[in-house]
Amino acid sequence: MHKEQDCLKFREGKFVATTHEVIKEEPLSISINGRHFVTAMISPQMKKEFVIGHLFSEGVIKSSKEIESLQLGDDTANVIVAHPLKAVAARKIILTGCGTGSSFLDDSKLPKIHATMTVGVEDILSGVKSLLDHSELHRITGGVHVVGLFERYAQGYVAVSMVEDVGRHNALDKVIGYGLTRGIAFEKTFIVSTGRISSEMALKCAVANIPVIASRGATTSLAIEVAVKTGLCIIGFVRGDKMNVYTNPERIVTKGEES
């Protein structure tokens, strides 16, 4: 997932020849029913989950069962779906960490999140803290985002998937793909992330029916607008024992109030 790279480090007024570990970034070209769909720049692990999660969050499929076959090459993914491919723009490029800039989701038909569960403040705080505790690649390279999917069990919320990727949108697609392939009930989950919560990340959560997303970072005005319309709870600047709840605060409760 990473490799050693020669570099010059500037220390104490002079350059020193040394090496540094850098994260691997590779293109993945996805074709659907023989037609090029998208080329994504991703970290090379969990390619299958990325493809499934991305097609789902972009509205191409409604469940992983619609995929009849998925064949992975070194830098390709060939997918056969049960229905004819919808009219979508081909040859789209996903730029690292920035999303597509043009989701196929129709903002005028935003999905509504159907979930009644609440999440405790302590669950959010510990969930976000666990991101950096988990992230060995982040410690080594400083070049990845981390996204975690937490699912509710009788004993509380448990991390069921932690994913590192050069792009936060990629990492979110991967955990969504992970959940789809394992039949996870997304209405009983929440997402934690190291990166900024963009409008596209908010849309991906809404499509998956994930009611809460929290991050160490900031959010955007359009993400908040999407969250208000879909019922998503956005939480930003989760650091130490502090956080900012921007939308749908009824989904977050203090100790003893969880439902």
Image (spheres, rainbow, N blue to C red):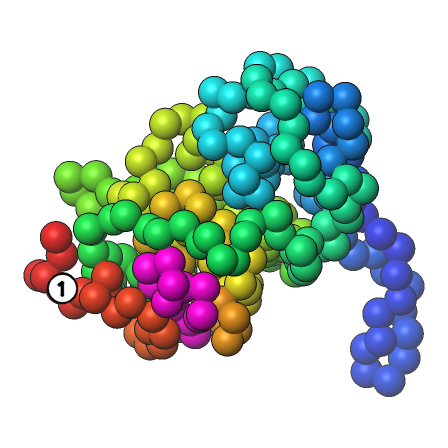
Residue 162 appears in the rendering: yes
The residue depicted at 21 percent of the width and 39 percent of the height is 153
How many numbered marks appear? 1
Rendered location of residue 127, percent (x, y): 35, 56
Give the left or right position of residue 95, taking residue 6 as reference: left
Say above or below: 24 vs 79. below
Query: In the rendered image of this protein, does residue 15 appear above or below residue 17?
Result: below
Q: Foreground residue, 27 or 132?
A: 27
Q: Position of residue 68 (x, y in %)?
A: 58, 15
Q: Identity of the amino acid at label 1?
A: Lys
Front one among 178 and 221: 221
Q: Is residue 204 above or below residue 46?
A: below
Q: Residue at x 40, y 26 (%)?
A: 182
Mark 1, residue position: 255
Along the line of sight, the residue nearer the viewer: 210 or 37 = 37
Residue 109 is a magenta residue: no
Residue 96 is left or right of residue 123, and the answer is right
Q: Is residue 255 left or right of residue 53?
A: left
Residue 228 part of the magenta-drawn span: yes
Which quadrant of the structure image shows residue 186?
A: top left
Query: Which residue: 77% across, 46% down?
Result: 92
Residue in view at x 50 percent, y 75 percent: 221
Asked whether, in this view, residue 89 is left or right of residue 58, the answer is: right
